[in-house]
Amino acid sequence: MPKQGQSVESCIISEFKVKVGDTVKVGDVLFGYETDKATFEEESKVEGTVLAIFWADGDEIPVLQNVMVIGNPGESFEEFRPSVSKAAPAATAAAQPASSAASAPAAAPAATASFEAVENNGAPVSPRARFLAGQKGVNTAQVAGSGPGGRIIARDVEAAALAQGHLTGLAKARMAEGGMVSPGAGSGLAGSVKGADLKVWKPSHTEGLPGEGTEYEVVKMSNMRKLIAKSMYNSLQNSAQLTHMLGADATKVQALRKKAKKALEEGKLDVNITINDFVCFAVIKALKQFPNLNSHCLGDAMRLFKPVNLGLAVDTERGLMVPAVPHADELDIIGLSKALKKVAEDSKKGSVNPDLLSPEAASFTVSNLGGFGVEWFTPIINVPQSAILGVGTIVPRPKQMDGVYKFMPYMGLSLTYDHRAIDGGEATRFLKKLAEEIENLEIDF
């Protein structure tokens, strides 16, 4: 299994394109696989026959593990069988020569290791997730799995542990036993959850309610939707978020947009520079003057970035993705426009580098809903980032000019920031500076 980025530990097989016994050539697609948010296809590097496939569609496989074997008919492949494989005996047996099948010992049971599912109260839980749950005092019966088939994996337990707050030793033990739920914030020191703070957990059921099948249907969330839901929930649960809103005169930006469009038509530019590109360019200039906004909030410390690693919220068919453009402050408006378009297109195609999708990859994020006609909104911080900017549509608003009110184009700006790291005054000054940068942007093409 290829390792797509430094932060990816496992990938999920979306579909095998070949089966045992098939003949493949160089360049043939063997299988499709996905990380949390990106999809890829693995092509054959050699010619030969598929001798064995150790996994099935939907399996989650650690990176660098053997997925399949290609060779000559009759060759042995047992030495390549991964030690943590959830092997498919029927598929591998078909590749063995008939003469040796009878004498060969029965295939060992599917090796159990960190990625084999184990049933727990009806929900599949990987052993690694079960171990983490015991350490962190997480009741897995309360956790929605994001792995194949709803399997609860390590990241699900870590997200649940983050959401339930710090637990004392007694609370951890009681939570691990099951039947209890954490209130999130307890009565102990620094908000620690004590055993006495825990409440009896009562599972909610929607199946079988009156009207199901006629008035509504219950549809399970996709793995992607579950990941987004958990990320949003954890963001709101673990940061003090507040949003300030301010309008910026968009006259200059609209003029620059017309100028760039004309230059593109005349062949002077090779990229279509959009309003959002100009806004992002202004954001970078403002962040350079307010380094506290260009940061990660780590709870009791801050990670202040020297470069601006700009995140861009991208709407895709699979859900919201936020790829980062590293060192965006080193790019001119043309380079920035190309870089933003590249990560957006890669995200929509599913070929973006997974490392760029990590919340840690960006130091500040921009989310633009102006194209949908939204004037103001409350964006949610992509933690551990300290802030995020929401950009709204441009609408005419009255403005006093030389004693006379005229209608001018105004762009809505919504800044959500983590109040633990940033004071309201500083956030307001940054937003005001950003509006000034937008209103006075000067760029030559």
Image (tube, rainbow, N blue to C red):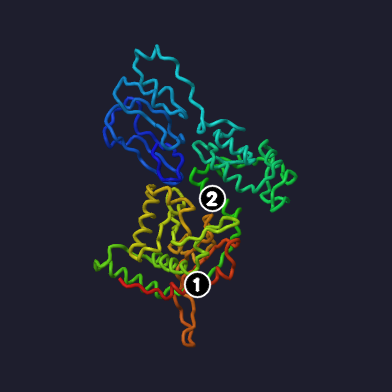
Q: Is residue 93 visible?
A: yes
Mark 1 or mark 2: whose residue is earlier in sequence: 2
Compared to 373, does 28 lie above or below?
above
> Which residue sits furthest left?
267
- At 49% from the left and 53% from the top, the residue drawn is 360
Give residue 372's position: percent from left, percent from top.
45, 61
Q: Nearer the viewer, residue 14 or 404?
A: 14
Name the amino acid, label 2.
Ser
- State the residue position of label 1: 247
User: Callout 1: 10 Å neighbours few (<14), some, many (20+)?
Assistant: many
| Number of the label disc, if any, that sits on residue 314 | none
Give the left or right position of residue 130, taking residue 313 as reference. right
Q: Is residue 219 visible?
A: no
Question: Helix, strand or loop at disc 2?
Answer: helix
Give residue 176's position: percent from left, percent from top.
66, 37
- Residue 123 is drawn in which quadrant? top right
Compared to 42, does 97 lie above or below?
above
Give the left or right position of residue 87, taking residue 243 as reference. left
Question: Helix, strand or loop at disc 1?
Answer: strand
- State the residue position of label 2: 231
Q: How far apart, in angstroms, are the residues tagged by discs 1 and 2?
A: 29 Å
